[in-house]
Amino acid sequence: MAEHTPRRNIETWAHELPASFIECRTTGHRWEPHSAVWDKQARAYHVIHECDRCHTQRKAWWNRNGEITSAGYSYPEGYLTKDVGYIGADGRGVLRTEYLARIFTTTARGNGSTPQASC
Ligand SMILES: [Zn+2]
């Protein structure tokens, strides 16, 4: 059995996360096409999408038929939760609470104005 990694309180952790990370963890990434390069050896496209909010990259191999043969992510510094362990339902609740407090603060506190409609 490996030694225990010290775990930080999840509220503290969420509170210190950049707003962009909170948004992506709550509502999902906002993928933008980044690049698609044919690789002769792999006989597939190396397709990269990047989140324009937190800059996580999704890197995948797409073959000629468009099948994804392997995929992975590379995360920006600080995105992963090494020191708080697995984020379960409770943790996601904490993130959502933090999201409400941080992202909606300005609209919620305004002068009772209705939230702006987007697009
Ligand atoms: Zn993101």
Image (spheres, helix red, strand yellow):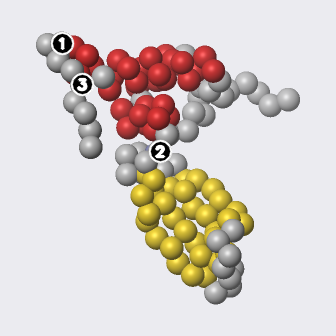
Neighbours of disc 1 within 10 Å: few (<14), some (14-19), many (20+):
few
Which residue in the rendered view is the most extreme toward the bottom? 40
Q: Where is residue 73 shown, x and y percent of the image? A: 58, 53
Report which residue position mark 1 lands on.
112
Task: Using the numbered discs, state the Cα–Cα distance from disc 3 to disc 2 in whole angstroms.
Answer: 22 Å
Q: Residue at x 60, y 17 (%)?
A: 90
Q: Nearer the viewer, residue 74 or 113?
A: 113
Q: Where is residue 60 shown, x and y percent of the image? A: 61, 64
Query: Ligand 1 quadrant?
Result: top left
Which residue in the rendered view is the most extreme toward the left? 111
Report which residue position mark 3 lands on.
115
**Nearest-to-viewer mark from 3 and 2:** 3
Which residue in the rendered view is the most extreme toward the right? 1
Question: Are discs 1 and 3 less than 8 Å apart at CB?
Answer: no
**Nearest-to-viewer mark from 1 and 2:** 1
User: Which quadrant of the figure contains the N terminus?
Assistant: top right
Image disc number at residue 32: none
Q: Amino acid at mark 2?
A: His
Residue 9 appears in view: yes
Q: Residue at x 60, y 34 (%)?
A: 82
Q: Residue at x 64, y 87 (%)?
A: 40
Residue 7 appears in view: no
Task: Using the numbered discs, state the Cα–Cα distance from disc 1 to disc 2 in whole angstroms.
Answer: 30 Å
The picture quadrant where one finds residue 20 is top left
SS at badge 2: loop
Q: Is residue 60 above or below residue 3?
A: below
Image disc number at residue 29: 2
Q: Amino acid at mark 3?
A: Pro
SS at badge 1: loop
